[in-house]
Every structure is written in C-alpha cells, then in structure tokens.
Amino acid sequence: MGAAPQVEISQVPVHVAIVMDGNGRWAEERKRPRLFGHKAGVASVRAVVEAAREIGVRHLTLYAFSTENWKRPKIEVKGLMALLKSYLQSEVETMLKNDIRLCCLGQQERLPTEVRETLTAVINATAGCSAMTLNLALSYGGRNEIMQAVRALAEKCVAGELSVSDLDEALLSDHLYTRGQPDPDLFIRTSGEHRLSNFLLWQSSYAELYFTDLKWPDFGRDQFLEAVADYGRRQRRFGKTGAQLRK
Ligand code: FPP
C-alpha cells in the first residue's frame, strides 16, 4: 500500500461513487487517440482503488461504461472492453490480497462473452472478500436500473407475492443492482462537467457532490484523498437544521 495520506481526513465516507470523465479530451489534448486516454485512465483506477482501500472506504463504485456508451465508435467500444478484460485479469491477485470483493452493476448480459466470463470469474474468486466492495458499473444506466426494479416489483404484485401496500423505498432499493449496499456518501466527477449522467440516480439522493476540473488520467491518489478531505469538511444535514444536528 502507498505512503501515509498527506491531507487530514476527519471522516471517511462509507461509499464513494465516481464518474471517471475526461479520458478522451485528455488524449485529444496530447494529439493521441481516445484509447490512449482510457489506457492512462486505468492507472488512475488502480491508484484510487488502492487509496480507497487504504483509508477504509467500504464501497467504491466506478462508472466504467454507461448504457449510452454503446453508441460510441465500434473501435472505442472494442478497445474499452479489451482494457476492462486485461484490468480484471491483472488485478484479481491484488484484489484477493487486499480483501476486495468485485461486483458489477449493470446489464452484464450485453457485455462481450469473454469480458463477461472474466468478470464472472473475478466476481466468484473474490466473493469471500469483505474489506471493501469494488463495484464496476458496466453497461449501467440509472433510469434503466430503476425501471427494471419497478418491473420486477410489478411482476411480484401480479403474481400475488407482494401487495401494492407493501411497496416502499426499502423494497425498491432491494431490487436495484446495489441491493444490500449503502447509498453513496460522496459522488465525485472529474473533467469539469457538472452532471449526474444517469449514474446512481436513486442511490445518490443525499450524496455530497464533488467536482474537479482535472481529467480522469490526472486524478490519482492525492486528488482522491483531497476529495475525501473536502467531504470531511461538509456538514450533512439530511433535511434537518444545523442546530438539530449539534444537539
Ligand atoms: C469517460 O471519459 C470515461 C469512460 C467512458 C470510460 C472509463 C474507463 C476507464 C477509466 C478505463 C477502463 C476502466 C476500468 C475499470 C479498467 P470520456 O471518454 O467520455 O472522456 P471525454 O468526455 O473527454 O470524451
């Protein structure tokens, strides 16, 4: 693991979610193909996973590929899938060593067979790990996730397994890809864009938002620790007043 954090961290978020944006622009600035940026982005993924595990984050969710990303040029999609496969293959030993469980949020069935097989193998190999859960959002879309949960609940109502009066927020949460996991406390987006982009729409209701102009390949361990330190300086009120919280 890396050196001790250089910034003071007063409160470690239980769940951090990240929109890893800006790989393409980072590469274009260097007059290189977009895939060059995605490759550089993998190094940031490694650094951030390591830092998160080290400071005690329990759930880390990375938006690696959205349902909308299928519309990108074939060559970019193919390159991203190849990167993903090689990342999973090269990281499984480190995940086991660091007690990290891998999960996938999204439409796994849409992924190319060999990516799906590698993903399943790593998910199974790390199923017993418990220090941190690393969620990779792959072919993920927040509206799609909510819609499939609503559909599953409706089917249970029609089948008589549930009645409409049983439906509540907890039950809906239980039908999302993140079932059993806490909602994100901190939501980070790189590259200067201030959008949610269909990421964890239901789960991020009370997440603290952190935006940085840095593009994802320039976001590493120190930048992640700075985001966590910034989170520690926020007051989370969950609808209450500051005075109520001080009691
Ligand atoms: C957004 O940047 C990034 C992606 C769509 C892919 C993110 C993928 C990686 C970081 C590498 C592979 C992932 C793992 C987990 C190994 P963009 O391409 O939209 O950038 P732009 O907005 O500058 O075009």
Image: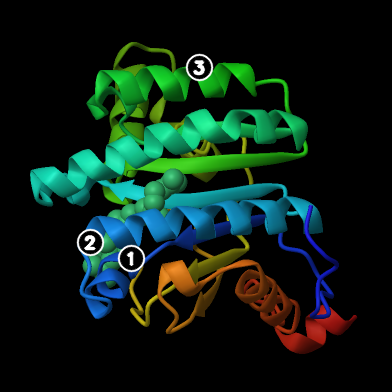
Image position of 23 (left or right of 210): left
Residue occupying the far bottom of the picture: 243
Mark 1, Cα crowd under 10 Å, few <14 / some 14-19 / many 20+, is many
Q: For the residues labelled 1 and 2, say whether their Cβ atoms are less than 8 Å apart.
A: yes
> Which residue is painted at 20% across and 50% down in the image?
69
Please state which amino acid type lies under the numbered disc 2: Arg
Residue 167, disc: none
Please state which amino acid type lies under the numbered disc 3: Ala
Query: Disc 1 or 2, which lies upstream in sequence?
Result: 1
Ligand 1 within 8 A of label 1's CB?
yes
Image quadrant of residue 149?
top left
Q: Which residue is mark 3?
A: 121
Using the image as rendered, state which of residue 239 and residue 53 is in the foreground.
53
Q: Residue 21 in the image: x percent, y percent?
A: 36, 67
Q: Which residue is mark 1?
A: 23
Q: Residue 51 in the image: x percent, y percent?
A: 70, 58
